[in-house]
Image (tube, grey):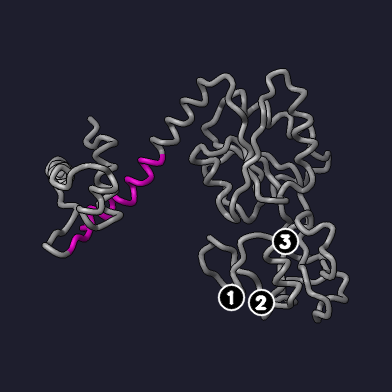
Amino acid sequence: MVELETRELEYFMAVADELHFGRAAVRLSIAQPALSKAIRRIETRLGVPLFLRSSRHVELTPAGEALREHGRHALNAVSAAVRNARRAGDTQAHLRLVLKPGGDAGLLSGMLAEYAHQPDARRVDILFSGPTDRADHLRDGRADVGLLYVPFDPLDGLAHETLHTEDRVVVLPPGHRLAGHTSVCLADLEGETLPRWMGVPPGDDTGPEVKDVVQMLHMITVSRMIGMLPRSLVAPAAAGLICVPVSDAPPSRLLLAWNERDRRPLVASFVAAALRSAPPDRGDPRF
């Protein structure tokens, strides 16, 4: 038995986000008394209070916190299911490929050309992501396939195939103490200022925040930081910048990824074409 309907969960999530019944009612385009009644009905059905209410304050109970966390995932899953069902029944649907700008290691043109020879080929729409959300595009159905970099992008919930394996280089401004080296190791980079990528939880990197490689290269040019990237993202190097291999950095792999639950021929056909077009020396997929 389903104890909560999707609409009821949407009502709860609006109040949980706003922590104000009036604002939540406006957001939902319903009357505030109707919303309050719906929330009381949900609490009665679940047998637990979800909110602590006073004349001036609304806050979530522990039960409400738990429902907010899992409820958001549930609504996202329902939305993704609807999108996927519609696309599965659409024989003219385009294939959507997500990648970050410049993040194809020079393979995209060959991949698209090979796929175009398929008798069932569809138009391919290219989507450009932010620095960290390509995997989210694939999990929630905004994209069908994507180009991801490991070890940078999370792969949970995704199937994938390796297209290309490459080394990583440190990008330096002219005159940097390491600029004349033929290679460096990770220990050589200790104490250096590295970028903080927008959307990535804070870690050891304390440098300026950047949202893409272009911003990072600008900051390196003016000696505000250094950066470490897969070689293909900075080949050829921008004028005035120096790229030095990092000998003991784990290799970077460019992957073609898709939702592990997606069994559509549309996706399988593109994956097969991409693998045929990839370089024969794709590297060891066990890395």
Amino acid type at mark 1: Thr
Numbered circle sitting on residue 115: none
Image coords of residue 114 (percent x, y): 78, 29
Estimate the spatial distance between the alpha carbons at disc 1 and disc 3, rounded to whole Å: 17 Å
Region in magenta: 57-76
Image coords of residue 219 (percent x, y): 70, 71
Is the C-beta separation of discs 2 and 1 under 8 Å? yes
Crowding near the residue tagged with mark 3, few <14, some 14–19, many ≥20 C-alpha atoms within 10 Å: some
Crowding near the residue tagged with mark 2, few <14, some 14–19, many ≥20 C-alpha atoms within 10 Å: some
Image coords of residue 84 (percent x, y): 48, 29
Question: Counting residues from the N terminus, which is met first, the one under dot 2 or under dot 3?
Answer: 2
Q: Which residue is mark 2?
A: 193
User: Residue shown at 53%/21% (left/top)?
Assistant: 90
178 to 106, vertically: above or below = below
Q: Which residue is mark 1?
A: 206
Estimate the spatial distance between the alpha carbons at disc 2 and disc 3, rounded to whole Å: 14 Å
138 to 168, vertically: above or below = above
At mark 1, the secondary structure is loop
Majority secondary structure in the magenta region: helix
Q: Which residue is mark 3?
A: 229
- The answer to whether residue 7 is left or right of residue 236 is left
Estimate the spatial distance between the alpha carbons at disc 2 and disc 1, rounded to whole Å: 7 Å
User: Residue shown at 57%/19% (left/top)?
Assistant: 91
At mark 2, the secondary structure is loop
User: Residue shown at 78%/46% (left/top)?
Assistant: 283
Question: Counting residues from the N terminus, which is met first, the one under dot 1 or under dot 3?
Answer: 1
